[in-house]
Amino acid sequence: MKLTLESFKVKAVQFGSRTAFANGTLTIDREEVCRLAQDSTFIALVEVELASPGEETRIIHVMDAIEPRIKVGGETVVFPGFLGPARTVGHGVTRRLAGLAVLESARLPEPTAGILEFNEGIIDMSGPGAARCACSDTHNVVLLFTPRPGVTNREFEAALRLGGLRVARHLAEATLGMSVPDEVEEFETGAADPGLPRVAYVDQVQQQGFLVQTFLYGQPVESVVPTILHPNEYFDGAVVSGNYRSMMKTPTWLRLNHPVIRALYRRHRRDLNFVGVIFCRGHFGDHQLKERNGYMVANVARLLGVQGVVQTLEGTGNTWVDFMQGVRALERSGIRTVQIVHELGGVEGTDWPIVDYTPEADAIVSGGGADRRFTVPAMKRVVGGTEVVFSSNEGWGRSLSAAEGLTVSAHEMYAGFWMMQTNGFTARDF
Amino acid sequence: MTVTALISIAERVGANRIFKTEGRFHHPLGEPTLTREAERGWRLNLLRAAVRMLTQPVEKPTVKSLADLVGR
Amino acid sequence: MGKPLTVLHYINQFFGGIGGEDKADVAPMRRDGPVGPGVALAKHFGGDATIVGTLICGDNFFVEHQEEAIALLLAMADTYGADLLVAGPAFSSGRYGTACGALAVAWQKRGKPAAVAMNVNNPGVELYRGDVYIVPTGHTAVSMSDALPRFAAFALKLGRGAEIGPADAEGYFPRGVRRNLRLEQAAGERAVEMLLAKLAGRPYRSELVIEEFGTVPPPAPVPDLPRALVALVTESGLVPFGNPDKLETWNASKWFKYSIAGLDDLERGKYQAFHGGCDTAGTDDDPDRAVPLDAARILEKEGVIGRLYDHYYVTTGNMANIKTMTRIGAEVARDMKAQGIQAAILTAT
């Protein structure tokens, strides 16, 4: 299965009378985009704002982030299961607008609480926060959704997701008229080189219920058992985020540009055979189910003839147990593992860094302590609202002015845990 | 004696008498899918078995389930 | 470079050339300049530091009269006014190692740096590594020539006030704090590198190494359960409705006990579970699911347990600070013992 990814690099965004892409500038027809994102049954109003890297701009209430992509020819669609039939993707030709993200910003109409709740995570386009959040280095097309009165969270969330995905695909359409991409990459796993180790990526995604879930070909993965995906399926949007615990989520944008998948592809056929992705969920309800899942992950890996895996987890808390059960089962099958994790450890870094552990986890790459604090400056512009309420900040439950300087940790940043890993943060013993 | 679903955590922190409950970790002695009355009986059954661990010697973190304590 | 640092060196009676175990009772004394291993240490300092004085104390004297020993040694130290204290290497000698650590801690309180050296198995490491920089050494003085250059280099860096980097880079025992730093390479790349090394059998270094929690000696079984006083305790955050004492839903710092006297079960609506890490709907619907009072009362009536203590204890085990929870556990246990409670049933979410 070979995928050709043609990238068109966005250097600037602006509003204009017609949506078009030329000379690195994406011009957006504002009204057209608002109409496309709309679903008048559930959404009262869609507005659009633009934000670019380096601006003193903060974006809040961000739901998902999506990179514009579109299939060129063939019979499949990007974001299968949402924008079209759930046919296997990851082959043929895909075009994308690189350096751009479509963001959905909205406030849910019904209050949320407990473990299935929206957690605020901000995006700072400049300053110390920028390295710890997603989409600070992309030109952002921010869709601002206002719900209709009386609409439920479920109705609204589903509508804005489809609106965001439609806009993302539509913007990518602007590349179809162009003949020469800025970059062409070909992704293919192909026949294994017997002299190189067979390696897979184990992706444990977050699945706890509505508002804290992941979609595979359009369906929540509540009942998924560990399965195999081709890495290219990620590049065409087979996995979409429905997870609004912002600090720990994997936004759809990140899945499309998956840092671990890309890292494995870079060494493919040179140092390793990248065999595929073992996809599973975490957050199972009891120890037995967690252990069962761990062994099923190892079983899939073994049947694939995998010799080594890189594992990541989405989420924290009890899902560490699921994660470590996977490590244990894999290592006991003779498969070598490396984990990429976030650490906790408290504000001072003196407390326990992770929630669960097994001695077999002897090769860990750390994205650093997500609890350590830093300050972000006041911003000239806030997109998406005026106030934020953080779930895990010192001022828990307190409403803060979003434009002001704030003392935060990765817990208050959009995709904070993942971005610390992706941007080279780590922690060491002192 | 600890009643929990997350036995690996209990073992790691050094709890010595660990009863592996059949409930989900959110409510260790709850089974909302049963009727109220059936659930009360279910809970009593588990707790009755669990307290047996209080009278048993252990040397290190030890996990037991209902089956271990009352036989098949 | 600036002028050389002045250094005080602490050693025990053996390395001070006073005598062996037979002289372990000698009281503190001072000598000008370097003594014993201090002579070789001074060579490694070169022109960058001068050992202006050596403090010597018998290991037994220090251990048996710690406060007095420290007071005497610090008074002697004052006559030199040195920039830096180095103590050891103590290798595996436990009394010597703990003396080095204790003296260094007292010295540091006056605002000047100290460096100590000893073997990983020396009890002084566990006791003091959180408070003092300790450079690892081999087991015995046979490894002196390996230890001294590293000890000297680290002490110089510390004495100059240079920023001390991570433990593995600088060569000291981790002090119990992890700090963030930023690397050029993203986590994904580092993970693939580490995996390739692991698969090829090449050495690799985990970025996170977990030390075990340690064990708790298991208490003996309850001798007579049908006569025992048993308490219910929970970390589910179950509190009377309204959370009157404001128990935290995460990172809890408190524990409470609430009366269950005369109650046969916990009534819906009168309690709520204040726990941000699990789905509390089931517990809110029937609090006995988290604190099994209904079942416990039946066991009490049946005589399986003697008597149920008339309160249940609660804290919240969600994103908790381990040190705080250790304190809470100890406080709850103390309260239980004061009540004559012999066994506890802990329901953990």
Image: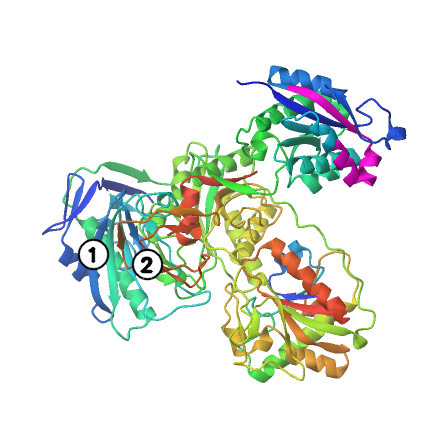
Q: Secondary structure at mark 2?
A: loop
Residue beneath disc 1: A48
Residue drawn at x 77%, y 40% is C67
How far from the left and from the top, in percent, is residue C170?
Answer: 58, 30
Which region shows up in magenta?
A: C50-73
Pick whichever, A174 or C205, lies toward us.
C205
Residue type highlighted by circle 1: Val
Say whether residue A36 is left or right of residue C99: left
Q: Residues within 10 Å of mark 1 (few under 14, many from 20)?
A: many
Residue type highlighted by circle 2: His
Q: Which mark is residue A355?
A: none
First-in-chain label (2 vs 1): 1
Pick whichever, A392 or A311, lies toward us.
A392
Quadrant containing the C terminus of chain B is: bottom right
Looking at the picture, do discs 2 and 1 lie on one chain? yes
Quadrant containing the N terminus of chain B is: bottom right
Which quadrant of the view contains residue B12? bottom right
Residue beneath disc 2: A61
How far from the left and from the top, in percent, is residue C312?
Answer: 65, 73
Which quadrant of the view contains residue C206? top right
> Relative to residue A259, is residue C168 depicted above or below?
above
Residue drawn at x 82%, y 73% is C224
> Relative to residue C48, is residue C229 depicted above or below?
below
> Relative to residue A118, is residue C172 depicted above or below?
above
Residue drawn at x 65%, y 31% is C115
How far from the left and from the top, in percent, is residue B39?
Answer: 59, 79
Q: Residue reaching furthest right?
A: C22
Q: Chain of mark 2?
A: A
Residue drawn at x 26%, y 74% is A149
User: Would you say residue B72 is visible in this rendering?
Assistant: no
Pick whichever, C256 or C53, lies toward us.
C53
